Image (cartoon, helix red, strand yellow):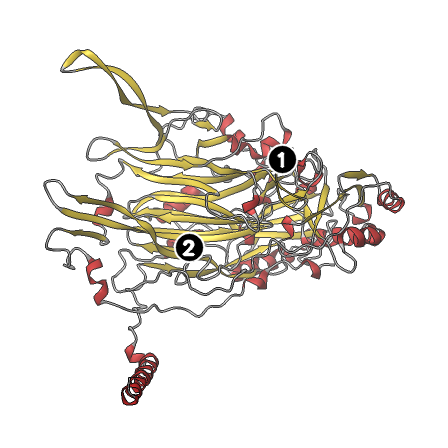
Amino acid sequence: MNSVVKWALVFLVFVSIVLNIVLIGNPSSRAPKCSAQRVHPLRGKHDDHSLVFADLTQEEYSQVQQYMLHQKDLDISTNQLTKPSENFLFLIDLSLPKKADALAYLDGNGPKPVRGATVVVFHGAQGYIKEYLVGPLPNPTAHRDVTTERYKTELPINARTVTVGEYALLFRLLEVEVFSQLEKLLKESFNAEGKKLNAFEQMPRGVRSGDRQTWIAFHRDVSSMYIHPVGFEVLVNHKNVNASDWKVERLLYNGQYFDTVGDLQKKYDSGSVEKIVYKKSLDYGSLKPRNKPLQVAPQQFYMEGKRFSVNHNQVLYLDWSFAFGMSSLTGMRVFDVRFKGERIAYELSVQEAMSVYGSVTPGMIITKFFDSSIGIGRFAHELVRGVDCPYAATYVDTYRYIDVPVPVRFRNSICIFEHNMGQPLRRHFADFFHNSYGGMVNSALVIRTITAIGNYDYMWDFIFYQTGAVEAKVHATGYISSSYLVNGSLRHGHQVAENVLGNIHTHFINFKVDLDLLGVKNVFQTKDMEFVNVSLPWMPDHYAMVPQLVENQLNTEKEAALRYNTKTPRYLHIASDKLNRWGHQRSYRLQVYSFAGDPLPESQAEERAMSWARYKVAITKHKDSEQTSSSLYNQNNVWTPAVDFSKYIEDNESIENEDLVAWVTAGFLHIPHSEDIPNTVTVGNGGGVLLRPHNYFDEDPSINSPDGVYFGPGSETSCDTNRMACLAQEPCSPVLEPFTYHGFDGVMKFEDWV
């Protein structure tokens, strides 16, 4: 190659590079931005009727708080460090209207229900808990005690949730009575000199009603503390509301029990106990990426604007409309769910998330967590764009008042997005006689929140499909609970790290499904199959086993309480007496997917507090007095629960042509394994219920969706019934919000309490 040609090539390369830089830097050369505005009009219109279910506003929370503080006879404090012996305003939440009143208003037959708030006060000075109904809102002027009306009993003070104020006193007790006395042990065994160990509690707090004795297991002070147990546990009796009477009653160190701190200290110093020798280890639970991220995962965006709209607490999406909200105690819920203008469900809501653990060490051996007693919705923090939800999702703020001095804003704690589910909703390729392709992408609307309750993160989804189906489901992630490995531990799980046992446990999730199909008078039906031996019509002497439909209607609550340990029909239906075009009762099917572990035996005293977990599905007659399957108080008074779900069934009322509620339990058995380190993944860990139309329509309503695709030979590139053929002609780049995050603003900071 001569020098002239060589320099000519160099010049051409240089010019090419310059031109590319210019083109990249020139906005006019880029693909245009996708429309941020909706290209196609909504099929429905927003209205304010959904506000009857709206969460309390920040102003309403403050108004209720100030109203209660002005009731001088109640002598209430809102100081977050209020002592258990004082009266503390713990919770303010929306008080839902009576169903009949709400329906009359929604359907234009009655006035707007009076808006009110539930206020929970821990009356430590008097020794009881009270619930008050405060209203009307806004600007409340009255309150009344509704405790016995709701629970048919008084609520003892020891049924209360442990508050920030009580935790502060517990941590102070541990510092004075334990840590300061065992400095040598803490240094040699855990390298805890000048550093703290983190506490993780056992619940329930004792073995009988009235107890408040908590085993506290200690873990290393790292972000993944839950999988770093150190082998040291302390039993604290804090039954009395006066902290001066609290005391340390037992200790566990390296599998050995001690009656007092002094006893442990003496035996440790004398060398008569088997010591734990500190060994530095890496934080194997850290979620910090071990490799630098080099690529962005596939993203989804809207080329023609969003096909859904959010106004206040109402969502419109294609043929769907619904109201949504967030309870501090039970979490996410939706109301007045309609498809093509017809109400399908009055309420779909999370009720409880419960786990039962196995162990040989006291911090886990009798542990049964009732998350609504801590607050499921309470821990719905900000969602991370592009990870927790699609980047381009619509994000909604929520406000809560639970164990705080003022209402707290949780930014972006609910997300709503339309999602390509990654597979066709339907399709067929015709290759016999006629040649054609017909299909439709499965695009659905998702409303989601994620609650980080201690070690576990639960992802809650309600999904609305174009077929008229609705799905309520949960996936679990976060950290497993673990205990220090001692003799006998491996009967209760697998070793997952050095001296760390991943403890076997169950997850039970309860959903409330209040379907109203063409009115509130519905029935409960089951369908299944059986093989019958029939003679062939053209060969009467020849027989074949042929599947046959088996249909039944269950008419009482006891008949319709379908236990997990018995065989249940595979098709469960809430049905109307109205018929479709083909003469079948219009119904929705409850399709439960779950691989839950065994429920706690009913012989156990604690079982009544979780009696809903006996049933895969239980159908009851709707009552406003049977609003929830669990309660705020079941965790800490598990032996005499404020709500015993089994009592909803004991009266065995008729469910024939009545307003029916389905209580659905899903979940999974979790036997932790090494792949749960560093973190449990969502894949395979979850459960839920799919509500599917079954003869409700005359045909699949999604056949009317604009997402359908159809073409035959010669029309493959026509855009008339195949928008996919036009995508290459409509390139655009997404319009994205800047990445922000404020989720750490509302977290609990234990170090501020001591």
Q: In screen coordinates, is 97 left or right of 445?
A: right
Residue 463 visible? The answer is yes
Percent coordinates x, y for residue 647 in the rendering? 53, 29
The foreground one among 366 and 85 is 366
Q: Amino acid at mark 2?
A: Leu
The residue tagged with tag 1: helix, strand or loop?
helix
- Judge whether 24 appears above or below 303 on screen: below
How far from the left and from the top, in percent, is residue 621? 43, 32
| Sequence-earlier tag: 1 or 2 | 2
Say the numbered circle drawn on residue 492.
1
Q: Residues within 10 Å of mark 2 (few under 14, many from 20)?
A: some
In the picture, the disc for residue 31 is none
Q: Determine the CA span between mark 1 and mark 2.
A: 48 Å
Q: Position of residue 358 (x, y in %)?
A: 63, 35
Q: Three-letter amino acid code at disc 1?
A: His
In the rendered image, the quadrant that contains the N terminus is bottom left
Q: Quadrant of residue 32?
A: bottom left
Residue that sits furthest to the top in the current view? 541
Q: Quadrant of residue 671?
A: top right
